[in-house]
Image: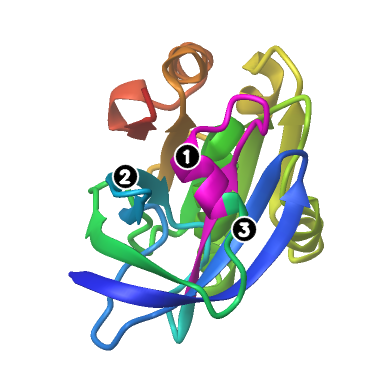
């Protein structure tokens, strides 16, 4: 789907991180873990970048999480940071096969911007009455309020600044109905799969989205 959608909200959700709420166009259908392409023309030049959904559903609105270092932000990143409710942006998608599909237990290993799909998937699983766990490697956590709400709802949330091994071992049960997801940049994905290999889970069965 290609559409122009309205911005309905902009929230500061952590260090150098904002969550954009966007209006769902008619007929739009996407699930947590899939991603969209956001596009805009800035000073006559076309820009586009992919962002993973960070909302548990797309009913009426949906959310993406944008992490930007202001000192290194390019024209498109600055454009996203300057968006306000009522502004418009072009979207296309959804894309991707690494998404929540109603599994009875989900474990999401997230690095950096991977926290967006992590909270969306975990919230969707909890809403369905399923089990959820998040292992989040960061030294500057984002979406703290939603992580706290997930804990209160019974999900397991582990935040690790460096080593993943203990947190992954605690989160993963290896049960046949458990699905592991991995979202993050290449170095995190490598570390997460190494940690996963030391558990009862099969790393090759994980749903992995490498951000490059």
Q: How far apart are the two marked residues, 1 and 3, measured between alpha carbons?
A: 18 Å
Residue 208 coordinates in the image, percent (x, y): 35, 33
* Residue 119: quarter of image: bottom right
Residue 109 pos. (x, y %): 54, 34
Please tell me which of labels 2 and 3 falls first in the chain.
3
Indicate left or right for 24 with 7 as reference: left
Contact between labelled residues 1 and 2, with CB atoms less than 8 Å apart = yes
Q: Which mark is residue 192?
A: none
Q: Nearer the viewer, residue 149 or 105?
A: 149
Whether residue 175 is visible here, answered yes or no, is: no
What span is colored magenta in the figure? Answer: 62-80
Q: Is residue 185 magenta?
A: no
Q: Residue at x 78, y 63 (%)?
A: 149
Alpha carbons under labels 2 and 3: distance apart: 19 Å
Q: Which residue is mark 1?
A: 75
The residue that label 2 is drawn on is 47
User: Which image quarter: residue 57?
Assistant: bottom left
Front-most of residues 78 and 64 = 78
Task: Identify whether 74 is placed above or below 132.
Answer: above
Q: Secondary structure at mark 3?
A: strand
Relative placement, left or right, of 28 versus 190 is left
Q: Is residue 135 left or right of residue 179?
A: right
């Amino acid at each position: 789907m290609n559409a122009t959608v309205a911005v309905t909200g902009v929230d500061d959700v952590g260090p150098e991180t904002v969550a954009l709420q966007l209006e769902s166009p008619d007929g739009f259908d996407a699930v947590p873990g899939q991603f969209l392409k956001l596009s805009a023309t800035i000073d006559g030049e076309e820009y586009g970048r992919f962002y993973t959904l960070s909302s548990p559903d797309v009913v009426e609105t949906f959310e993406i999480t944008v992490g930007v270092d202001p000192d290194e932000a390019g024209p498109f990143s600055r454009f996203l940071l300057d968006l306000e409710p009522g502004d418009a942006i072009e979207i296309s998608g959804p894309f991707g096969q690494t998404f929540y599909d109603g599994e009875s237990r989900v474990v999401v290993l997230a690095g950096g911007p991977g926290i967006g799909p992590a909270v969306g998937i975990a919230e969707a699983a909890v809403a369905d009455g399923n089990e959820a766990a998040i292992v989040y490697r960061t030294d500057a956590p984002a979406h703290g309020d939603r992580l706290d709400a997930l804990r209160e709802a019974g999900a397991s949330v582990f935040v690790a600044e460096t080593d993943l091994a203990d947190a992954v071992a605690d989160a993963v049960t290896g049960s046949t109905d458990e699905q592991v997801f991995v979202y993050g940049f290449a170095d995190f994905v490598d570390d997460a799969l190494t940690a996963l290999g030391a558990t009862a889970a099969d790393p090759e069965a994980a749903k992995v989205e490498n951000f490059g």
